[in-house]
Every structure is written in C-alpha cells, then in structure tokens.
Image: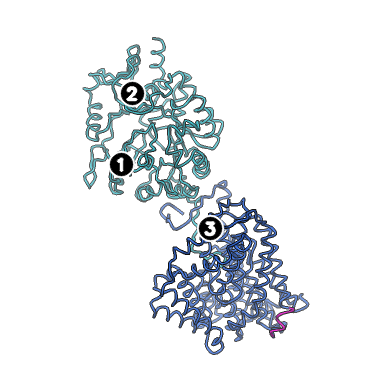
Amino acid sequence: MSQQDYKEDRRVVVDTRPIPLVILAKSYRFIIFLVAAVLFVVIIALPTPAGLGVAGQRALAAFVVCLILWVTRVIPLAVTSLLAIVLIPLLGILDSSEAFSLFGNQAVFFILGAFILAAALMKSGLSSRMALLFLRRFGSTPRSLLIGAMLVPALLSFLMPEHAVAAMMFPIILEVVHSLKLKPLKDNYGQALFLSMAWGAAIGGVATFLGGARNALAVGILKQSTGQFIGFFEWTIAVLPLVIVMLVIAHLIIGRFFPSQITDVKDAVVALENKNKKLGKMSLEERLIGLVMILTILAWVFLGGRYELATIAILAVVALFALQLVEWKDLEEYVNWGIILMYGGAITLGFALEKSGAASWLAKVTITSWAKSPFLVVALLALVSLLFTEGMSNAAVVAMLLPVGLGIGKQYGIDLRIMVFAIAVPAGLGFGLPMGNPPNAIAYSSGYINPRKMLTIGLILDLVAWSVFLIMIKIYWPLINIKF
Amino acid sequence: MQKKAAIIENPALLKLELLSKGVRLDKSALKSEEIAQALEIGNRVSVPLELDMILPGNVLVNIAVQECLDKDSCYVLKNDNGEFYITNGVAKTRVWIVPPPKFYNQTTSSGALLAKIGRTYGNYLLITPSGACEFLSRDMACKYCDVEAKQTPDKSIDDVLETVEAALKEGAAEYICFNIGYADSEDGGIKQLLPYIKAVKDSFNALICIQAQPPASDEWVDMTYAAGVDSLAYNLEVFDPEIFGLIAPGKKRLVGRDRYFKALARAAKVFPSGAVVSNLIIGLEPVESTLKGIDALAAFGVVPTLPLFRPLPNGELTSYVKLSPEAIAPIFIHLEAALNKNKLSSSWINHFNIVVNAIDAHLFGGQTPVKKNWPSIFSAKKHNKLALNLRRRLRVRATDNNEPTGL
C-alpha cells in the first residue's frame, strides 16, 4: 500500500521483518495464484479418469482453484465465489443462465432476510436491551455473571448471526471488565468473561439457521443438489441437545482453567444498571421490531413446510420497511453483503460438482476407498470440518466439504441430512484460534485473552464437541428418526 | 586569550558558541546585500533575525542575531569588502552567509507570504500547519518552549503546497518537515498532519519528516509511516526522569516518559535505520544524564539530536546548566561513539543546521574537515527516494476490516 491508498478505515500494519522475508511474504499471493493456475491446467490437461466425465473433470479443476483461494484468502471470499460463478459456464460445466440463476437460490435470500432482521434488531438497540436485561438477572455473583456472559450470547445467537451477537456483547462485557478493574492477560476472570461470550455465541450459533448463516447455506446446497430439505424447526430439534451439553461443558471447562479470584461483582452490576438506564424506556420502534421478529420465527417454525423460509424472511423484511422500522442506509451499515455473494457462489459450485459427477467421484477416491463403516465416515468428516474451521472461514469449510460429503453419503446410502449436520455443525465450533470463529476474533481483540491458553483449552473443547456430536448421532438422532 | 582563539579556530566549537550565544551585527555587516535581504525578510515575517551561515569545514549553522548577553564572549559578524568574518575580539575566521531563499518574498494565490508558511533550516523546509498544542492550552507548556498559546488559523493545504513547490523549485529544501503540537487523542496530533502529508506526497517527490508527540498506540506509529513520512522525531528533550517532569510537565502528565521510549522503539523498527530521532537538549540537565540518554536512545535505534539550550528572554529556566564549549564537546564525541556502536547513521539530520551533528563532531578532535564543494553539502542524494518508497510499499500492509474473517 502506498500513502496514496491510505484510508483511515483500514488498519495498517508495518512488517518489520528483514526485507528478504518481507519480499518472500509479498510473493505469497503470486505463488498461490501460480499454484492455483498450474493445478487448474494440470487437472484439465490430464487424461479423464475412469468414472469421471469431462464436465466432472473441469468442475474438479474449478473446485481446486476455488478451494486454494478460499483457504489462503489471497482474494476476498466473495470474489472467489464470483470467480466460481463465471468459471463454471466458461468451462462448459453448466450453461451460463443456469449458473447465474443458482445465485438466486432460496438459501441466499433467506440469509439476506436474516441479516436484515438482525440489522433491525441492532440498529433499534433492541438486541442490546435484551442482552442487558438477561445479563442483569445473572449478575449477582461472579459465577452467575459468568453463566450469564455465556448463556445470553448463546440465546441471542438463536436469533441473530453469532458475529453480530459477539460484536454487540463486546462493549457490554468490556464495561463489566473495566468496572471490575480486571487487568488484560493477568486476571483470570476477565479472560473467562470474554471466552464465555465468544464460546457462548459460537455454540448458540449452531442451533438455528439464524445463528450461523452457514447452516442455511448447507441446507441450500443440499436442496439444490438433491432436492432434500431440512426445516427450521427440524434443524433446531436435531442440534439443541448438543448446544445445551456444550454450553454446560464449556462453562465447566472455563471455570476449571480460569478459577475466579474475585468474590464480588457489585461494581459490574452497577455498570450494567447504568448502561440499562441510558437506554431509557423501550420505544415503539423496538416493540414493533420485536413483534416482527417473533412472528417471523413462529412462521418459520409452523409454516416452514408450506412456504419457503426465504419467502417468510423476505416478507418480514418488507414488513420492516412498510412500518418504517429500518432505512436502506441502515442495511448498508449492518449487512455483510460480501458473505451473501460468497454463499451464492458456493451453492453454484456445489451444484456443479454434484451435477457433473465430480462430487461422487471425489468421494469414491478419497474416503470411500478405505473407510469401513458409515459411522466412521461421518466421524471423520466431522473431525475434518472441525479442524478446518479453526484455520479457515466456516462458510468456506461448508462450501468445500459438503459437495464431497453429499457424494460420500450417496455412496454409503447414508441419510444426506446427517452429512449436512456432520459438516455444518462442527464448522461452527472452532474454539481454539481467533480466526476459528468470528466471536473468537472479537473476544481476542479485547487484549484480555492469553492466546496460548485459548488455544490449549479451545482444542480440548474442540475434541469434547466432536465427541458429544458423535454421541448425539449414536444415541439421540435415532430417537428423532435421523438414522444411517 | 588562547582559549578564545582556539574556539574561533575550531568550527565545531565555534558552532556551539554561536548556537548558544548568537551573533551581533557590526555596522559593516549591515551594509551588505545578504544581511539586508535577511533583515527585510525578518521584518516582513515579524520574527527575530536568524542567519544561515557556513563555517570553515562546511559546518552549517543557523544563528540568532541578538545583542550580546555575555560581554566577555561576544561574537560579532563583520564585512570586509564582501567577505564575512566572525570575531570574538581575539581572533577571527572567515564565514559564508547563505542568502535567504528567494521564495520567501513570494506570496501564495491566497495572498499569504511564503516565508510565513514555511522556513528553511539547512535543506529542511519546516512547516507548522497548526499552532494548537494542548500542553499550552492546559497550562502545561514545556519550559524551554517559546511558542505562545494563541489562536492562529490553520495553514491551508493549498498554501502549504505552493510553498513546498516554490522551495523545491528553487532548490532551497529537500526535506519537507511538519511540526505539530500535542493533541490529547489516540493519535497524539498526527492525524491533523495526514492531509498535508498526503497532499505533498501526491504532488511532489519529496522526503517528509515530522516532529510530533508520541501517539497513545503503536498503530499510529505504523500509520504515520504508511502515510508517507520518511523520518520522524518524538522529542524527549530531557532524559532525567525528575527533571523531565519539571521541564516538560505536559509531556510527563499527558504522554508519559515511558510512552516516549515505547513509541520511539516501535518507530525505530518501522522506519529506515537512522530516520527516527529524538532531541536531548544540552544544558537542561547534568551532562552525565545527557550521556545516559544518548546511550539509551541509541540502543533503541534512535538517533539523538542535541540542540543547545538557548535561554528564553523571559523564560522560567534561569538556573539551567551553563556549559562551556569544552564541556560540551565530549558529549558529541560520546554521541558519535554511541551511533557507531549501534550502527546508526545520522544522515537524516546532517543538514539540519540548528543542531550539532555527528559530522560536526569529527571536528572537535581537530580532524581535517571533509572536503566538499559547499553548495553540494545541502544535497540529500544519500537518501534514495525510489528505494525509500519501495521499502514502504514492501513493508506496509493494509488489512481490510470488512473482510468477514471466519464467517
């Protein structure tokens, strides 16, 4: 970047390593592009393997290019998705009208609707009010405040994207920490509060389509590729026990590794009270937004079978505008348009892999060739998803693994809903690294969290989450008629 | 007598004397065209007269013209048939007056006198875009500072650009140096300079230096470099912690001494070697303390600059440490050794004529001055602008906060 490109809204970092290392690091993008281009050409030029058509081979080449770009993030995720949308017709895998029309998938519009609803909640201050209301009820002892710091974001993540919940909770927790005069990195209780917030939001985010948009993306890919569907209520019923167990375990683990050295949280309670007073009385705008939100969720639960979830979401958005509860400029501030583009491209690529037969072929030559049982396959995929999400975008993990996962599911005759859960749910449960989950990154930015401790305890929690997930598959899902 | 003669004969010692005591003009000097020009400019800008002068050995100095305060050691500038001499009554030495830049007499499109926008010191064009400083407004002014708390309008970017253009065109400056007072915000005041820096960098291929107070976060140090600044000064002024608090109460209370060291250490990592400097004013604290300060700063990778304290006419610092040139000279020899030990070059300040630099320090030991054609001593070709810009392009990364990390 030169001084001409300098903008205040961009964070600037000066690389102080020796110049040869800097040059090497700078060449990283070029090397990645080169590797992607070479692999693309090689895959296209190789003789078509048995069991794979030319279209499948080309889809595989496009998939590899997108995979490299998604994982390395040398260009924004959304731009890689746009590349996928144009590569697919360019390579003759789908015709261009079909490829572009896939962007209009209902999952994309559901996500758009969910983002707009969340924007209305945040803009009106209703989400902050809810957070403060719940948190105040918990804040009598250090232990109960800690429970609140985890439970409140978890519950809010049922309704809003987890990153929005974490961003909203962050200043509240920061105020609590300041009021208790906790020192960054030194005081266990400060670390415990921020980790509770981050992990609570992440765990809550897997419970519904609203918490983690990747859930809706996964269902969108499933529907586009196979015609099968998972309803709003059905998803939550399947995942809720995992959420409850993980919240309890996460709280116990935090309590074990960050024993509190404080005995009194009166100052925090006062700070929360003051913050609540500043909000004043609940406005008519907040009440109406709350009403629209409740009606929308009820419609998703009870009318989800009759109407598309996206249809309900978009109607709710129209209602928000009709009642003048949001303005377009609010959406520009709160809605992450890039992620919507990213999801559209991922769905298109997933469909192309499925339709061209590349997904099935890839499944055959990878896991299917040596995995002996469907359970082992699912366990392995869940573990891969969990580990990948620590280092890369949750949505990219879903976009990358799900088409292959669906192919594997078909090979084994596994209920494809299991494959969706096995990939999408662990993709939201990265606890160890700041980049594992948006709430982790937000909590880490406080400066209170020791990264080494976060990694150690987070990885333990990753393994616990994986184990709980497998137990749930074995014991709970058969009870709700989700079987291998 | 011998001592007085020795000072006149050694240009580095003479520079020290002239910096601290100034010079008085003889009637013969007043008749010369160079002095007349300088006087005219001084009158138009309403600032005390200062003369840029070259002493034997290509030693640059900026001298205040003032009445003699100490009758025993007066320095007088004389003109003998077009040749200038400085004498202390015992001996005399030839000097060369650098005529004031021609651009001083020009005005900007808005009618402002260019000399009021920026002034040259050696090959530095010093511009203070805003007179605001919270040390002054909060009654915590540094005791050595002669800036008055007055509300002057900020200089416009257009006026600054016209001044820079005129100075560069004339060859009167190669470094554009911005000076800014303290602002009690995370950036410490640097934010105010950014539009000026951007405008100058966009319009000219010039080297930019700034003098500011350390920002509250290192992120602003990085941003300063990213914005196009080539050299930076966070001036500590005094090393001794106690004297620091007494002399610079605003610096101590609003910034903090530790913050100076932390910000300087970060800046030394971010900027090219030798491009981060910090003042330690000689005469405000015991010599031992100054020597410790030199060592501490140099160890961080910061080049100490050592201006001499000039007592203010009505200033509070009446009991400052009065040092003879012989007592001061070892400080500069120590400076040179500290720079060598830490492999630091003082090239960024070699042509800043209001301080004694390491090149001058060579002369304290009576070494032969480096032979140079004196007009060429202003050249800053040592600093390859292309290489400096390439370095910045390589080192600076911008992270887009809008990228949905981990979503």
Disc sitting over residue B22 in the figure:
2
- Please, what secondary structure does the residue beneath circle 2 have? loop
Query: What residue range appears in magenta?
Result: A474-480
**Amino acid on which disc 3 is placed:** Leu
Image location (x, y in percent) of residue B222:
48, 48
Mark 1 vs mark 3: in front:
3
Image location (x, y in percent) of residue A451:
63, 55
Disc sitting over residue B169 in the figure:
1
Mark 2 or mark 1, which is nearer the start of the sequence? 2
Counting every numbered tag in the picture gives 3
Chain label for disc 3: A
Judging by colour alone, the chain drawn in blue in this rendered image is A
Establish if B59 lies above or below B106.
Answer: above
Q: Which residue is mark 3?
A: A174
Q: Nearer the viewer, residue A393 or A325?
A: A325
The residue under the point 41% across, 18% down is B10
